[in-house]
Image (spheres, grey):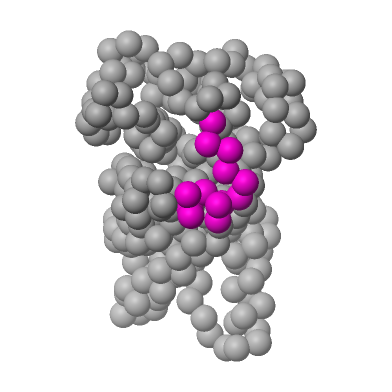
């Protein structure tokens, strides 16, 4: 669905929010951009998943296997957090170009006609950004992006592993779909709470304009200070519901499919790392 839907509700793309509710945002996008406007930036979103998500999950799974305790039990929760942070940092660096394209493509429909970039696909976006603004622009906002990924993956991956371990320690759960669903729901909630503040900084910096030769923001700290000063502390979590509707199902599906794929791989190729 539209990549900046929940960010519109919180005013992430600018100083004021343009939509009053999730329903209002969807109907507004449909009215202004048509049915396909809801899926603006789909190619960029797919490329982002193919780079960022696969890298972070692969790195985290490998690190979890490497840092198992001598008795074969999973590492401590704090170590899981550290491993998630490392996996997120590596994955986000690789996925930043697709992230830049996604942010720009999904916000294009809200810009005045003369300011729209009109990228036709993620590959057109990557090519034009490189040609018109330079190669390093593909990693603009890399710092906040990595920071977000560090926070998100520390919350998402570590919480999932720990929640799954806790559920399996009871007599009510086995290592099956129900356990994976429960652990991923807990992970999705923790991820949403942890990621929303850093999402504000990341998105505004990546989508900012250069005014009179100067960027709108000097860094993530300036974004936080302006949001808190102008809108209050709780503005950092404004739009929690649409955010959770985006992150929650994504987290559930990610871990359920990953667990099933790992199970199939273990059955066909022997022992493989598990979350």
Write the residue at 57% across / 24% down. Answer: 113
Quick one: 56 or 108, which is closer to the camera?
Answer: 108
For the N terminus, the quadrant is top right
* Residue furthest bottom in the image: 269
What residue lies at 60% left-to-right and 66% top-to-bottom? 259
The answer to whether 186 is drawn above or below residue 168 in the figure is above
Name the foreground residue: 260 vs 247: 247
Q: Is residue 37 above or below residue 227?
A: below
Q: Is residue 126 left or right of residue 255?
A: left
The span picked out in magenta is: 116-128
As rendered, which of 228 and 144 lies closer to the eye? 144
- How many dots with numbers? 0
Residue at the right extreme, as displayed: 35
Q: Does residue 98 appear left or right of residue 258 in this picture?
A: left
Asked if one can make out residue 264 in the rendered structure from this viewpoint, the answer is yes
Q: Position of residue 49 (x, y in %)?
A: 55, 56
Any magenta on residue 95? Answer: no
Find residue 202 and report its image quarter: top left
127 or 169, which lies in front? 127
Taking the spot 34% from the left edge, 34% from the top edge, the residue there is 205
Residue 238 in view (yes/no): no
Q: Quadrant of residue 78?
A: bottom left
Which residue is located at x 65 percent, y 68 percent? 260
Magenta-drawn stretch contains 124:
yes
Image position, residue 134 (x, y; %):
34, 51
Give the image location of residue 219, x and y in percent: 24, 33
- Percent coordinates x, y for residue 140 in the rendering: 33, 45
């Amino acid at each position: 669905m539209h990549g900046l839907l929940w960010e519109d509700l919180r005013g992430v793309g600018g100083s004021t929010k343009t939509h009053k509710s999730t329903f209002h945002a969807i109907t507004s996008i449909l009215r202004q951009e048509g049915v396909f406007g809801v899926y603006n930036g789909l190619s960029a979103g797919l490329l982002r998943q193919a780079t960022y998500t696969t890298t972070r999950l692969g790195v985290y799974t490998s690190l979890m296997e490497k840092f198992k305790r001598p008795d074969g039990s999973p590492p401590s929760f704090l170590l899981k957090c550290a491993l998630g942070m490392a996996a997120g940092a590596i994955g986000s660096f690789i996925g930043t170009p697709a992230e830049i394209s996604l942010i720009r493509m999904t916000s294009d429909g809200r810009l005045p006609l003369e300011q729209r970039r009109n990228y036709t696909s993620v590959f057109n976006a990557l090519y034009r950004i490189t040609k018109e603004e330079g190669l390093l622009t593909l990693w603009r906002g890399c710092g906040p992006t990595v920071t977000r990924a560090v926070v998100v993956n520390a919350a998402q991956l570590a919480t999932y592993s720990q929640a799954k371990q806790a559920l399996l320690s009871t007599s009510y759960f086995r290592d099956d779909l129900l356990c994976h669903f429960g652990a991923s729901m807990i992970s999705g909630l923790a991820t949403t709470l942890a990621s929303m503040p850093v999402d504000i900084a990341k998105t505004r910096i990546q989508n900012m304009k250069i005014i009179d030769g100067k960027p709108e923001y000097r860094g993530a700290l300036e974004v936080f200070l302006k949001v808190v000063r102008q809108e209050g502390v709780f503005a950092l979590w404004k739009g929690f519901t649409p955010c959770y509707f985006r992150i929650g199902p994504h987290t559930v599906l990610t871990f359920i499919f990953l667990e099933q794929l790992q199970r199939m791989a273990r059955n066909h190729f022997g022992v493989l790392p598990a979350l």
